[in-house]
Amino acid sequence: MARKYRIAVIGGDGTGPEVVREGLKVLRVAAEGCGFAYETTDFDYGGQRYLASGGDPEKPTVPVITDEEVRALKAYDAIYLGAVGHPKVAPGILEKGLLLKLRFDLDQYINLRPVKLYPGVECPLADKGPEDIDFLIVRENTEGLYSGMGGVQYKGTPHEVATQIMCNTRRGVERCIRYAFEACKRRRDKGLLTLVAKTNVLTYAHDLWRRAFMEVGEEYPDITKDYNHVDACCMWMVKNPEYYDTIVTCNMFGDIITDLGAMIQGGMGIAAGGNINPEGVSMFEPIGGSAPKYTGQNKINPLAAIGALAMLVRELGEEEAADRIEAAIAYVTATKLGSLAAGKMGCTTSEVGDLVAEAVAKGLKP
Ligand code: IPM
Ligand code: MN
């Protein structure tokens, strides 16, 4: 029977809809070439809709997305997200009300972020090439400093107290670590999994991570269990990125080191990620933001969104399509683009989408 998937599309704000359009262009060609079918449903969740429905930080009764809307997304096989962030909406509202709400309520407990330097892409690190920069970061995605626990007292007075709790559960940490061991095994790279944490300071929270890592690690005798403090990891990512195979880390550290990762792979124009619930519905997005200044100009780089699309089809089990899209991205970066930066690519957003779609159709590789 023909494989058919239902994909929820949330273009979101700013340049989100533009880059998602290019991803969907590539999906059409990949599906034809690889023999699967799909249907997409658009959702207008984002800053625009929030403002139109009277959203205002002073009126928390207007939700960015409702529980029912989140529940309805569970009926899809995957979610494809463009960007979250609107210049007229106060920071934190859309992030918490949409992006983090989706990650939490859909229990997307893994944030998978490959750091891969494609051929032809300018790297800010001297003397490093695609063979040096190719590793995977597995970021925990539902706990840690993102749990939303904490509070404030005596606000606005000299006695103000503010706490933000780094919440780690054994179950949450363990399932993330187990996923990372499996991901490391699947990569068939060096068989090296590095736990990135701060056990010398976070002596409770990251001691839990360390023990869970060592205990789960006993189930994986073929994988080398490695440890880096997060500050040292930042240093190595710049000095010796070729050292890494797979990294597993907590939510906050993962947020930070994946931006560093994005820079060494050529910038936000190419960095893709997946919010994964291996037992439920996962959501794929370019890591960069909504880039308000480029909105509607056909200048933004859609490759990160196209890379996210490749991750989406891989999660659906369409390995051949995913491989073809990734090869097509590599073909385009190696042969067609000047730079990956918005406005400097030497092509428009839609032209980049056309180039990748054509390369997918023809099965081109660099
Ligand atoms: C990311 C973003 C988000 C995060 C923000 C927008 C809440 O920076 O996806 O990395 O911190 O996770
Ligand atoms: Mn981030």
Image: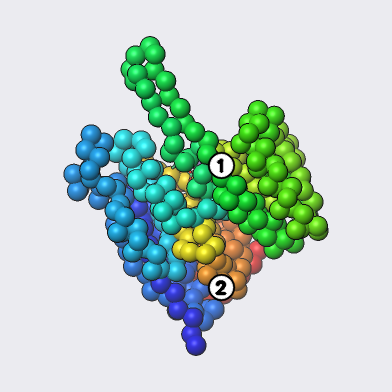
Q: Amino acid at mark 1?
A: Asn
Tag 2 residue: 318
For residue 123, which numbered disc appears in the image?
none
* Residue position marked by numbered label 1 in the rendering: 168
List x then y, in percent, for residue 258: 58, 43
Q: Is residue 254 above or below residue 360?
A: above
Q: With respect to residue 197, does 73 lie above or below?
A: below
- Report helix, strand or loop for mark 1: loop
Q: Residue at x 37, y 22 (%)?
A: 153
Alpha carbons under labels 2 and 1: distance apart: 34 Å
Disc 1 crowd rating (10 Å Cα; few below 14, some 14-19, many 20+) is many
Vertical relation: 318 (above or below) 261? below
Q: Quadrant of residue 86 in the image? A: top left
Q: From the viewer's perspective, is the residue at label 2 or at label 1 nearer?
A: 1
Question: Which of the two labelled residues, at mark 2 and mark 1, occupies the earlier sequence position?
Answer: 1
Evaluate whether residue 184 shows in this view. yes
